[in-house]
Amino acid sequence: MLPPDTGLPFDDIRALIATMPGPDEGARGAALKRQGELVKPPGALGRLEEIAVHVATWQGNSMPTVNRPMVAVFAATHGVADRGVSPYPGAVTRQMLDAFGTGKAAVNQICATFDAGLRVFDLALDYPTPDISREPALDEKACAATMAFGMEAIAGGSDLLCLGEMGIGNTTIAAAICHGLYGGTAEEWVGAGTGSTGDVLARKIEVVRAAVALHKDHLDDPLELLRRLGGRELAAMAGAILAARHEKVPVILDGYVVTAAAAVLHALDSTALDHCLAGHVSAEKAHGAVLERLGLKPILDLGMRLGEGSGAALAIGVVKAAVACHRGMATFAEAGVSQDG
Ligand SMILES: Cc1cc2ncn([C@H]3O[C@H](COP(=O)(O)O)[C@@H](O)[C@H]3O)c2cc1C
Ligand SMILES: O=C(O)c1cccnc1
């Protein structure tokens, strides 16, 4: 699904936001009713019950499925990577794409564990976006086109979309977006990423501070903020989240970088992430704070700080189990179990 080709590119994105479908209250009501009838004390499956009802609500199906979960990993390169903001060189981004291709990365193993599909999107890796502390990452047309490209993540059909990213330097980008959206200090939003400490961490904070200062007069519009402080994988992920909403596909977010992309949509419309689950809270310093601002409660908290969709993919197991219980358990009446405690 591509946005209609009318008007300014960002206007097309705004039109998709304005026309997002809301929750399917019929499916939600029926799913809640079924949860109350299943052969267990009410609420005994805890968050699994909420998760099953969430998937039912956003698929618009009181008997939801997780038969075709898909992990979409968006990869891009960043000019800031040359500023010494990551312990790893920018070349690692392409090397990791090779590892995804041969099935040797962490996300491959987690996808295999849960029978999830994995698609990797190479967003012009040979052309890093400019250093955001010196100029905008993207122009409006490129940002909107990259968001539209991200909408391809769900092409071919999926009943649960997990988002991941690969792009050395992109925890700097995520921090700039969060600092731009939420204010505070650069220190507050910058974390270790792949393991930055000392001078590397200090440079990272400085780059984030300089980037937000450079673009400060243009940050009121979240799409403008995304194009200036973002990168291609963040724009594509925002597009994917929006397309999934229109196609009734629930989404699982991953760590700090994915959540920063999602936060841009939330700033445009506070209901834009209502179909999303937070797969986990990563060990990246500010991830928990962003999730709190978005009103998202992470499913897992395992101290992971990898990115590449690993935390979202791991949460597929929990969501699958939640939906399996919802679909497969007997009701008290079916099981002949007495319901009065
Ligand atoms: C071998 C390796 C595998 C990865 N898989 C994901 N990332 C993660 O690390 C990067 C962000 O961290 P920073 O901002 O510190 O560069 C992203 O590419 C992210 O997905 C990796 C990083 C490395 C080194
Ligand atoms: O939380 C994340 O998204 C993350 C953390 C470290 C490295 N890359 C990504």
Image (cartoon, helix red, strand yellow):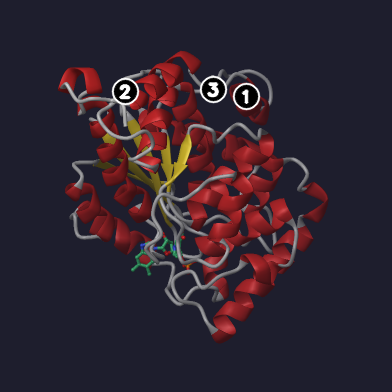
Q: Are marks 1 and 3 in contact (CB under 8 Å)?
A: yes
Classify mark 2: helix, strand or loop: helix
Q: Nearer the viewer, mark 3 or mark 2?
A: 2
Q: Position of residue 273 (x, y in %)?
A: 55, 36
Please give the residue where the numbered disc 2 appears in the rendered image: 37
Tell which of 340 and 166 is nearer to you: 340
Q: Is residue 262 above or below residue 174?
A: above
Residue at image location 43% in from the left, 31% down from the top: 54
Determine which quarter of the picture holds residue 114: top left
Which quadrant of the figure shows ligand 2? bottom left
Q: Callout 2, which amino acid?
A: Glu
- Return the mark for residue 3: 3
Task: Name the side, left or right, on which 214 lies relative to 167.
Answer: right
Q: Residue at x 55, y 67 (%)?
A: 285
Alpha-carbon distance for marks 3 and 2? Answer: 42 Å
> Which residue is painted at 61% across and 31% down in the image?
271
Identify which residue, 341 or 175, lies in the foreground.
341
SS at mark 1 in the image: helix
